[in-house]
Amino acid sequence: MMGNYIIFLIIYFLLLVISLVLARAKNEHSFSNYRLLNKSVYSTIGFLTFAATLFSTFTLLGLPNFFRVHGIGAWIFLGVTDVALVAFLIFIGQKIRTRVNLSTFSNLSTFLLNRFTTSHAKHVYLFGIFIFLLPYVAIQIRGVISFLQEIVPIGTSLWFWGIIFTAIILIYSFVGGLRAIIYSDIFQSIILLAVTYIIATNCISDSGGIRNMFESINGSNPKLLTSPGPKGLMNSQFLFMSFVTIILMTITQPQLFTRIIIIKSNKEFRKMCFWLGIFALVIITPTIFIGLYGSINYGDVAPNEFWVNVLVKDQNKIVGGLLLIGLVAAAMSTSDSQLFALESEFDSDSKEFNWKNKLSIILFGIISLLLAIISPFQDKLISFATLSFQGTSLLTPLILSSVFFKNPNNLTIYTTLVSILIFCLAIIGIIPAKIFGIYLILILLILLSIQTIISNKDGFYIQ
């Protein structure tokens, strides 16, 4: 069995090498092509790469486990959120594309540098994305290496797979550029969608159909069919906080912001957003049934055991092998996109390659690996993804004030930095995550927004 998985892995890595070679040949040593594909991507490729970056290992690991533990109440929330995300992306995305001047745009950090009267705006932004993308990359690494360690137990610990995987994503993102990453994204989107539906169909069939599945849940743990779920997590405040931060991540996380910029035209951009919304609903729906199947058959086991049983042992060898490739591809797609986006943001010189700036990204990769290995969060992939969304959401006033206000006030830079530091203190437990029963992240976002609006007295940019 293990030999079959190794063969699948070898095939996948050969495909990566081929895509890397093709990407290098087409980049033609053009920096604009390497970094932004000359901003000429069509909607079909655009939605596949956006979706692959947005939906990662937590889609196939985190979401089924989330439904298994907390119930299906999140499905309606996720559906509403995805529709709102698309509407927000269409409106804000077109404004951003108009405002940043696509012909000269190189990266968001340089845009902030030019819009504010101090370089502190750029530095605060770089600090924020560096800190809050760490948990998101870490969960990609942790998810895939935990899975590999269970089904292909080579080496004595998670370190073996962790070092190999981190090295691969660093090399792939540095050498191939955005084109190679998009090749990987396309493959990941297709394989992830196919495997998720195959596994969900098998789970429904093994449960005797959807009706029997729900009747079994209703008999054993009926709270899984209601909100806020058996653990009370999905209350109205948690859902609202998640709703806001998930929507805002489309403009605050650099790997997604880049994908707003690279689309060929506003018409193609709108088409991309439409198909992205469809894909989001299509990919999330089957994870409900995988999670419910897990709650019926593996309700009390650890997440790792649930994943291996449902996704591998209860499937045939071919599906298990495709699942392994899909999982590795999903982690690759999201991780290398974030590493490449970070490297792009740290490099302010858009005219030539600068290998010195890659040192900060190598450091980022090492810290992500350490966080993935030593932090006990293997059962909290969704929580760590949410943490990343929440942290980067604090950059929203800084970004939007540079887009919408004529002369953005520097005060927003410093209040953003203070908010980031306060939120970090809450993460490590020095200050409470709730104040008077309200999530701290919501309080910070509200105060930041009020301050930004009040302090910018020169009015809005209009075009």
Image (cartoon, helix red, strand yellow):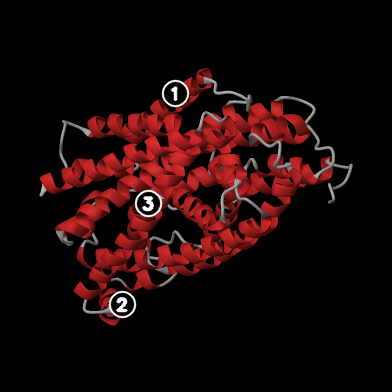
Question: Which residue, as the protein is rendered here, is positioned at the far top?
Answer: 356
Q: Nearer the viewer, mark 3 or mark 1?
A: 3
Circle 1 SS class: helix
Per the image, the residue denoted by label 2 is 214
Q: Which residue is mark 3?
A: 187
At 27% from the left and 44% from the top, the residue drawn is 12
Q: Please name the amino acid that badge 2 sits on.
A: Phe
Disc 1 crowd rating (10 Å Cα; few below 14, some 14-19, many 20+) is few
Separation of residues labelled 2 and 3 (CA atoms): 33 Å
Mark 1 or 2, nearer chain start: 2
Crowd class of label 3 (few under 14; some 14 to 19; many from 20; radius 10 Å)? many
* Viewer-side label of 2, 3: 3
- What residue did someone put label 1 on? 363
Residue type at the position of mark 1: Leu
Q: Earlier along the polypeptide chain: callout 3 or callout 1?
A: 3
| Nearer-the-camera pick, 11 or 445 | 11
What residue sits 44% from the left and 34% below the top?
25
Image side of residue 319 versus residue 75, left or right = left
Mark seen at residue 60: none
1 or 2: mark nearer the eye? 1
Residue 114, horizontal then vertical, whole percent: 75, 30
Circle nearer the N terminus (2, 3): 3
Q: Amino acid at mark 3?
A: Phe
Q: Visible in this render: residue 435? A: no
Q: What separation in Å lies between label 1 and label 2 (alpha carbons)? A: 47 Å
Residue 214, given in percent of the width and then of the height, sits at 31, 77
User: In this view of the protein, which residue sits in the foreground, 237 or 43?
Assistant: 43
Measured in 3D between alpha carbons, the distance from the residue under mark 3 to the one under mark 1, in whole angstroms, is 28 Å
Secondary structure under the numbered disc 2 in the rendered image: helix
**Which of the 4 quarters of the picture holds residue 113?**
top right
**Which percent across, then down, holds residue 292?**
30, 68
Residue 361 appears in the rendering: yes
